[in-house]
Amino acid sequence: MEKIVTTGRGTTAPPLPVTTHRRRSWLRGDQLVAVLMLLPSIVAAAVFIYGFIIWTGYVSTVKWNTVVEDYTSVGLKNWLDLFRMDRFHWDIRNLLLYAAAFMSQCIILGFFIAFLLDQRIKGEAIFRTIAVSGVVTGVAWRWLMQPTTGINLLLRNAGLVDTDFAWNADPRLGILAISIAAAWQFTGYVMSLYLAGLRGISDEIREAARVDGAGTWALYRHIIIPLLMPVTFTAIVLTGMASIRTFDLVVVLQGPAFSTGMLAFHMYQATFGLYRFSLGATIGFFMILLSALLVGPYLRSMGGALEE
């Protein structure tokens, strides 16, 4: 179909073709298939993750502290009661001590082992991470920390101690004992992160530094470690979140009363031991907020890096 256009002088301009635009679908065939494949996961995440987060937040504002459901709204009363509890203060103290010990052990030991493996030593596969459940780890370390066996026997034979003591029975050492067991379980994962980061640094960068006269210490201090800062940030976030949700090791290696208690264990006891569901939901939602404080800056930094 052509359209005739006339000029002001009476002459006829060449006909202009008129094109008809077909209405295109907003999704191509491959995009539609991708959406359909992802839809079950999106629905499951919306229901079982975000839906339950919203539900937990709602339960933390109602009066449900018995087996019988009670959805009477109490506002922020559960939160105020939680913040006044001595045990909650003790849980926060234990969590801070545990997180500091656990995260430092994982990051320092993980980087050191990755540094050794980066030297292409023999038997590298022995140090690769192995998945071990927290309960199995806790049982093994509970035996190792018995008064007359394991670590105490080794220390006594080395002349470092002269008395037998139970690590998890001592309130001063209970948190340290749990952090050692957790670090033994998680260090391999942090090591794999650092090793992947080290293997991702090109040999040209190392050779250029050596040509400039940099030794091994200067190479790692001024070049390698700064390049691994994104890996370190990731390790801090992952170990921090693992610290917040630590539960199984606390159950197996728990000390007297709540001397080694932390938030996850308190939430479990409040919910399934005392049937104080609103209190348990309040503790759980508080843990979610702590995790968000860790993950939020991480996601923001990763988003900025992708934009650059």
Image: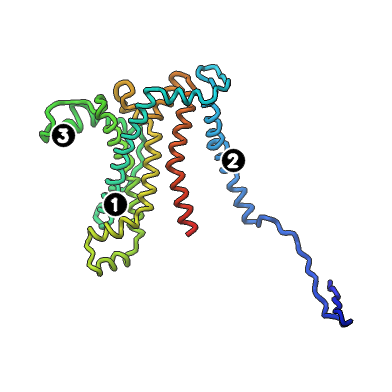
Measure the alpha-carbon separation of dots 2 and 1: 39 Å
| On screen, residue 305 above or below 102 | below
User: Residue 90 in the image: x percent, y percent?
Assistant: 34, 26
Q: Which residue is rendered at x = 22% and y = 26% of the image?
A: 166
Q: Circle 3: is it few (<14), some (14-19), or many (20+) Cα within 10 Å?
A: few
Q: Closer to the N terminus: mark 3 or mark 2?
A: 2
Q: Do the residues bearing badges 2 and 1 touch, measured as CB atoms within 8 Å? A: no
Q: Closer to the N terminus: mark 3 or mark 1?
A: 1
State the mark number for residue 154. 3
User: Residue 171 in the image: x percent, y percent?
Assistant: 26, 26
Q: Circle 2: is it few (<14), some (14-19), or many (20+) Cα within 10 Å?
A: few
For residue 45, side relative to residue 268 (left or right): right
State how many labels appear: 3
Q: Which residue is rendered at x = 32% and y = 37% of the image?
A: 182
Measure the alpha-carbon separation of dots 3 and 1: 27 Å
As helix, strand or loop, the secondary structure at mark 1 comes to: helix
User: Residue 59 in the image: x percent, y percent?
Assistant: 54, 26
Q: Label 2 amino acid?
A: Val
For residue 60, side relative to residue 127 (left or right): right
State the mark number for residue 114. 1
Q: Label 1 amino acid?
A: Ala
Q: Label 3 amino acid?
A: Leu
Q: Do the residues bearing badges 3 and 2 touch, measured as CB atoms within 8 Å? A: no
The scheme the figure's colours follow is rainbow
Q: Residue furthest right?
A: 10
| Residue closest to the eye, 258 or 110 | 258
User: Residue 280 in the image: x percent, y percent?
Assistant: 46, 25
Q: Circle 1: is it few (<14), some (14-19), or many (20+) Cα within 10 Å?
A: many
Q: Which residue is mark 2?
A: 43
Measure the alpha-carbon separation of dots 3 and 2: 53 Å
State which quadrant residue 267 falls in.
top left
| On screen, residue 33 above or below 97 | below
